[in-house]
Amino acid sequence: MIAIGRAAATLFEKKGYLETSIDNIAAASGFSKGGIFHYFSSKNEILYFVLDNYMNTALAGLEERLKEKEEHFSKIKFIIFHHVELYCLYTSEAKTLLHEANHLIPRHYNFIAAKERKYYKIVESVVSNLFCNGLRKGQLKAITFSLFGMCNWIYSWYNPKGTVSPQELSEIIFGIFSKGIWNDNISNGRKSKNAKKMNITSYDRNAPDPTNRKTLSVKAMR
């Protein structure tokens, strides 16, 4: 089943769910059509298997491992590393979740959406604790989705085999997130206890100028 799911995920990523046939999946996985239907009743069930397996992997042991870390920033860093690593290991599945989940039948879609909400709530809770639970609901949502945005958008440009390793990319995202969020729009000019502990200021005058094209080249990171 796993081999069928991996082959299907690759095809769903490259061709799209609607353009992928059972014949395509059979050819890519090395199974006959009869072999495919021995495990799955339909192409839609294969899509559900791919996404359900991916979300189960994302959630497996996540809360337990976060409890092992005492510092809030360590938890944020772990989440970022976990998210990026998961993407690099299961790139096709991650892209399929982002682009093809809407093709699931309603019952299966709701199952996947529930697991996505659970994942979101775990991350949201860590972000809230980072700010000592002092954020307004709208602020918490904005910051949490900003973190997801940085981690999820890598699918559009990042090549794990390029010059920037997944570990280095995770460090870059963590650095941007941990330093960039402490600003006057959120803290009204005051640092939280966690920010003071990390000696984070709202603006680092010694940081590289992001407007300087030599500072960061997207092509260089492909």
Image (tube, rainbow, N blue to C red):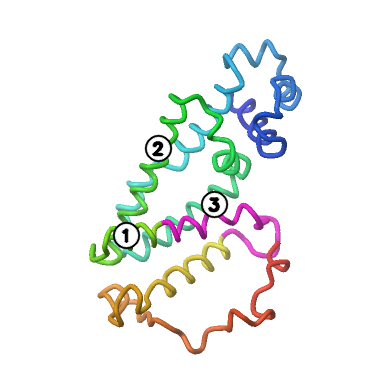
Quadrant hosting residue 1: top right
The amino acid pointed to by label 1 is: Gly
Q: Secondary structure at mark 3?
A: helix
Query: Mark 1 Cα within 10 Å, few/some/many (few <14, many 20+)?
Result: few
Please tell me whether residue 116 is drawn above or below residue 200 in the rendered image.
above
Marks 3 and 2, the one that precedes in the sequence: 3
Question: Do the CB atoms of the residues marked 3 and 2 lie less than 8 Å apart?
Answer: no
| Label 3 vs label 2, nearer the camera | 2
Residues in magenta? Answer: 145-166
Q: Nearer the viewer, residue 176 or 63?
A: 176
The dot on residue 115 is: 2
- Would you name the residue on which mark 3 appears? 85
Residue at 59%, 27% in the rendered image: 2
Q: Is residue 164 left or right of residue 128?
A: right
The amino acid type of the residue labelled 3 equals Glu
Contact, CB < 8 Å: mark 1 with mark 3?
A: no
Q: Secondary structure at mark 2?
A: helix
Which residue position is annotated with label 1? 138
The residue lying at 72 percent from left, 68 percent from top is 220
Q: Position of residue 53 (x, y in %)?
A: 50, 32
Determine crowd level at label 3: few under 14, some 14-19, many 20+ residues with C-alpha closer than 10 A: some
Location of the C terminus (image quadrant): bottom right
Q: CA distance from mark 1 to mark 3?
A: 29 Å
